[in-house]
Image (tube, grey):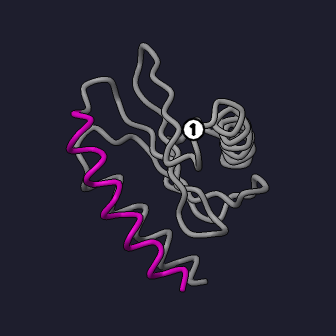
């Protein structure tokens, strides 16, 4: 995997996507693979919490008979945290502010996921 290439993809995504504050690519076991996070955020802690949220979300989806989890979204007063699977071995975390237009944001996320998947292979 080209970590520097993926890091560049994440930086371009964050800087070129309206209302996105940060992004990270995380392994399923909570290790940071690449990130472009706001300065005050701890990359390792954010990665571990993302993996925990994904694991819990998958268990909830299974218990509620919702099938495979497509995305997990947390909405808070200050914005969104969105987790989307990015291949078999990684999860894409996106942090967006409250003014983000969800439809456009999801479209941009899907484009970034396609680019990241290509870089992973």
Quarter holding the C terminus is: bottom right
The foreground one among 17 and 107 is 107
Q: Residue furthest top?
A: 77
Q: Is residue 107 above or below residue 74?
A: below
Quarter holding the N terminus is: bottom right
The foreground one among 60 and 89 is 60
Asked whether 108 falls inside the magenta stretch, the response is yes
Q: Is residue 109 above or below residue 74?
A: below
Quick check: 106 left or right of 77? left
Q: Residues within 10 Å of mark 1 (few under 14, many from 20)?
A: few
SS under mark 1 = loop
Name the main secondary structure of what is drawn in magenta: helix
Quick check: 23 left or right of 69? left
Q: Is residue 7 above or below residue 14?
A: below
Quick check: 109 left or right of 33? left
Q: Residue at x 57, y 38 (%)?
A: 66
Rendered location of residue 95, percent (x, y): 45, 39
Q: Provide the residue span drawn in magenta.
A: 101-121
Classify residue 118 by image quadrant: bottom left
Q: Residue at x 34, y 59 (%)?
A: 110
Asked whether 27 falls inside the magenta stretch, the response is no
Rendered location of residue 82, percent (x, y): 47, 40
Q: Residue at x 49, y 44 (%)?
A: 71
The residue to which callout 1 is attached is 66
């Amino acid at each position: 995997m080209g970590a520097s290439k993926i890091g560049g993809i994440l930086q371009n995504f964050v800087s070129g996507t309206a209302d996105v504050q940060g992004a990270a690519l995380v392994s399923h076991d909570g290790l940071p693979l690449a990130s472009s996070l706001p300065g005050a955020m701890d990359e390792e802690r954010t990665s571990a919490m993302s993996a925990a949220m994904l694991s819990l979300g998958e268990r909830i989806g299974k218990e509620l008979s919702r099938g495979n989890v497509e995305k997990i979204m947390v909405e808070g007063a200050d914005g969104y945290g969105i987790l989307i699977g990015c291949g078999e071995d990684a999860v894409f975390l996106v942090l967006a502010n409250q003014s983000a237009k969800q439809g456009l944001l999801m479209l941009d996320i899907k484009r970034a996921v396609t680019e990241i998947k290509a870089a992973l292979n």
